[in-house]
Amino acid sequence: MVKRAQRLAALVVLGFGFRAVAQNALPSLADQQAFLRKLDAAAIERTHHVVRYLPAYVRIPYPEGDVPADTGVCTDEVIRSYRAVGIDLQKEVHEDMVRNFSLYPHKRGWLDHPDSNIDHRRVPNLRVFFQRKGVALPVTTRAEDYSPGDLVTWDLGGGVGHIGIVVDRKAVLSNRYEVVHNIGQGPRLEDVLFSWKITGHYRYFGPKP
């Protein structure tokens, strides 16, 4: 019984049918909070940049590659925010896709093999990656369930995906945390958490040591 209790205590159980995550697979609570504060600041800093919404395929270096700084889409704001805190999502997503390509979505018109130029810039791939390598949190309609540093994905309609980062700024009217995202007008800080159908809710602290 003691050993069984110890095993159970070593797990963080996420409700609503989500998977359990080993306690020792995550940083300490203090380190998590410190990381989320840095990510929050990096995301807010992105709103000071002028970025033209340009979804074109672009060949970029690997690792640490990026499309031109004055262009990008919603995923690029997440990628750039993480890069500002020392995490290269291009590298992390590519490496996981090379090892586990069959677990990632294969849409019509996509390549039939990993592509470090574009794979990390696709919302469906990020959803699988954060589910596998981060912490998958419940999708709810309660604003209090979403915290600064959380990643949220949406379906804009017709299967068009979108992604943003919840930040520590609250909207005056709703008192909800706002979101940094780029839906066509560059990186913006807006009260859009429940503007579209939420398809995913995650936290990602970087590659495990």
Image (cartoon, grey):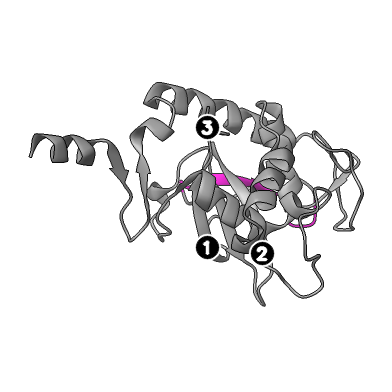
N-term-proximal mark, 3 vs 2: 2
Residue pointed to by mark 2:
161
Alpha carbons under labels 1 and 3: distance apart: 27 Å
N-term-proximal mark, 1 vs 3: 1
Question: With 46 as the anchor, is 23 left or right in this view?
Answer: left
Residue 120 placed where, x, y %?
72, 50
Residue pointed to by mark 1:
198
Identity, as a three-letter code, of the amino acid under mark 2: Gly
Tell me if residue 184 is in the magenta stretch.
yes
Q: Residues within 10 Å of mark 2 (few under 14, many from 20)?
A: some
Tell me the magenta residue range: 175-185
Q: What element carries label 1?
A: strand
N-term-proximal mark, 2 vs 1: 2
* On-image quarter of the N terminus: top left
Alpha carbons under labels 2 and 1: distance apart: 10 Å
- In this view of the protein, which residue sits in the foreground, 32 or 155? 32
Q: What element carries label 3?
A: loop
Residue 116 placed where, x, y %?
80, 48
Tell me if residue 63 is in the magenta stretch.
no
Q: Are marks 3 and 2 in contact (CB under 8 Å)?
A: no
Alpha carbons under labels 3 and 2: distance apart: 27 Å
Q: How many labels does the image show?
A: 3
- For residue 173, say whether it is visible: no
Identity, as a three-letter code, of the amino acid under mark 1: Ile
- For residue 63, say whether it is visible: yes
